[in-house]
Image (cartoon, rainbow, N blue to C red):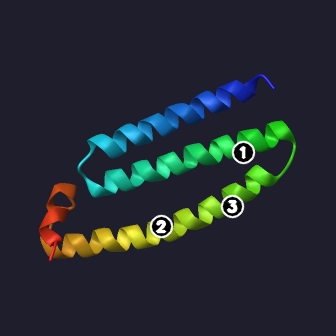
Amino acid sequence: MANFNGYLIISAILFSIGTIGVLTRKNSIVIFMCIELMLNAVNLTFITFSRYLGNLDGQIFVFFIMTVAAAEAAVGLALIIAFYNNKDTIDVDEVQLMKW
């Protein structure tokens, strides 16, 4: 199990990159991709612990997370496209202009 720590370190690095991307970027598509990166980091952690503990619980969680991520991708991209059609930009600072 020498790679156990390596996988957790890679997962922590990926999650950190995703968090920094969400907090610092203004482009909604890049923010969306960073959220997906964070979800994949959590998936890697679940798979690592599942493999380490020798059961399938983590892999079942990953299946459900991937299902929710696919639904999120569909809804999120639809919102981004609708926003782009209205304002011709995908800058998150412009989202405030869509308030009633």
Q: Are marks 2 and 3 in contact (CB under 8 Å)?
A: no
Residue 70 tag number: none
Q: Seen from this angle, which residue lies furthest front? A: 100
Residue at 38%, 56% in the rendered image: 32
Element type where label 2 sits in the image: helix
Q: Residue at x 33, y 51 (%)?
A: 30
Which quadrant of the rendered structure holds the C terminus? Answer: bottom left
Neighbour tally class for label 2: few under 14, some 14-19, many 20 plus, Cα within 10 Å: some
Query: Alpha-carbon neighbours of circle 1 within 10 Å: few (<14), some, or many (≥20)?
Result: many
| Kind of element beneath mark 1 | helix
- Label located before the other in sequence (1 or 3): 1
Asked if disc 2 and disc 1 are in contact, CB closer than 8 Å, the reply is: no
Circle 3 crowding by C-alpha within 10 Å: few under 14, some 14–19, many from 20:
few
Q: Position of residue 41 (x, y in %)?
A: 56, 43
From the top left corner, tell me how far across and down residue 78 is, in percent. Answer: 35, 74
Alpha carbon distance from label 2 to label 1:
21 Å
Name the element at disc 3: helix
Image quadrant in which the N terminus is located:
top right
Q: Which residue is mark 1?
A: 47
Disc number for residue 63: 3
Question: Could you tell which of marks 2 and 1 lies nearer the N-terminus?
Answer: 1
Q: Which residue is mark 2?
A: 72
Image position, residue 80 (x, y; %): 30, 68
**Viewer-nearest residue: 66 or 99:** 99
Q: Amino acid at mark 2?
A: Glu
Relative to residue 94, is residue 16 drawn left or right? right
Amino acid, disc 3: Phe
Residue 60 appears in which quarter of the rendering? Answer: bottom right
The first of marks 2 and 3 along the sequence is: 3
